[in-house]
Image (cartoon, rainbow, N blue to C red):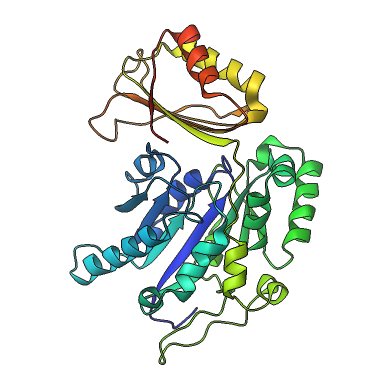
Amino acid sequence: MTTDPRVPVTVLTGFLGSGKTTLLQQLMQRPEWRRTAVVINELGETGLDHLLVQHVAPHVRLLQSGCLCCSVREDLTQTLADLLARRRRQELHFDRVVVETTGLADPLPVMHTLTTHASLVRDFRLAGVVTVVDAFNGFATLDQHEEARRQVAVADALLLSKCDLVQPAARESLEGRLARLNPSAPQHRVDHGALRSEHLLYLENLDNPFHAPAPANTPAPKTAGWLFRATGPLTGSLFQRAQHAHASDIQTLCLTVDEPFEDEAFRHWLTLLTALRGERLLRFKGLVHIAERPEQPLVVHAAQHLVHPPVPLPAWPDADRRSRLVFITQGMEPQVIERTLHKFTGARAVAAPA
């Protein structure tokens, strides 16, 4: 275990729908992870992940309107500075920070920020990068998305989710591909967001794969790992190469619906949408008001053709009882979603700026 006195920051990344938020919910319920501040970044103006985590994590901050690798690094810097100031005033009590990136994020720029920003490195250290990989969609995601490949390549640990949905041979084939992409990162299988105790212990002691400037009295991090040696020194040119734009046909659509949905109609619509357009539906998540159970909103997730079983929350996380639906699509016209939603459920959705 390191003797570095600075607050460790773990970057939790993984492509859209990989299971990052589910993992985070499980971690925050572990007694040893309760003293954790969480910073969540989401694309679009309608954030949901922080609502799903805040009932188990006491200190949650939301970064909206952009991807950490593109537009909100200064917001991250200010958020961490604010958390530290409140900790010094004893308004907050935490021993570590977890930064959950959006599924489209390239982690290198946020790693660069955490390891080079003068006002951050005095008090924070990059503990490491944990990448969640969806075993069900993993091969197709790696084939189609450069961001997903970069998320795997920079990881200190790889967590395979949804292993129960694939055959052992397919899972082992994916594990082989991940090992070729990042031979230095250990791989752990996740069961519905839960990790075994020995894997939790590993996450608490991630080694820093980058040389970070540190105060004179702070022990230097371990020698950089495979990625650092392969890419050479962490220079401006590497950082600039990491700032590539995302594919222009990837869009975020945020909808709010005032009236409750009939349960059967909503499920039928979502099943049909994922069946017909699943290859273009990178991610869907929703907090849904169901007429039959008005006091228990449903948390609904889908990734491509896979719809996860809805999970009821014990109560609404805030006073807003509207359904909130967030779609991240590639090459799909937003009107298709809005039109089919109205046709199958009768609901009229209002699109928020994304």
Residue drawn where x is 61% and y is 22% of the image: 274
Residue located at (40% from left, 92% from top): 217
Quadrant assignment, res 73? bottom left
Which residue appears at 62% of the width and 69% of the height?
238
Give the side of residue 111 with respect to residue 93, left or right.
right
* Residue 11 placement (x, y as % from top left): 50, 60
Count of numbered circles in the view: 0
Residue 265 lies, with reference to residue 297, above or below; the image says: above
Looking at the rendering, which quadrant does residue 233 occupy? bottom right
From where the camera sits, is residue 290 visible? yes
- Which of the 4 image quadrants contains residue 75? bottom left
Whether residue 32 is visible, yes or no, is: no
Does 302 sit above or below residue 222? above
Q: Position of residue 33 (x, y in %)?
A: 40, 59
* Image point (72%, 37%), residue name: 166
Across and down, in percent, residue 41 comes to: 43, 49
Q: Is residue 266 above or below residue 243?
A: above
Is residue 332 found left or right of 49 in the rendered image?
Answer: right
- 218 or 75, which lies in front? 75
- Of residues 265 and 28, the one drawn nearer to the viewer in this rendering: 265
For the C terminus, give its image quadrant.
Answer: top left
Residue 64 is situated, as x and y percent measured from the top left of the image, at: 38, 46
Q: Which residue, as the protein is rendered here, is positioned at the far bottom?
A: 216
Left or right placement of residue 228 versus residue 36 in this view: right
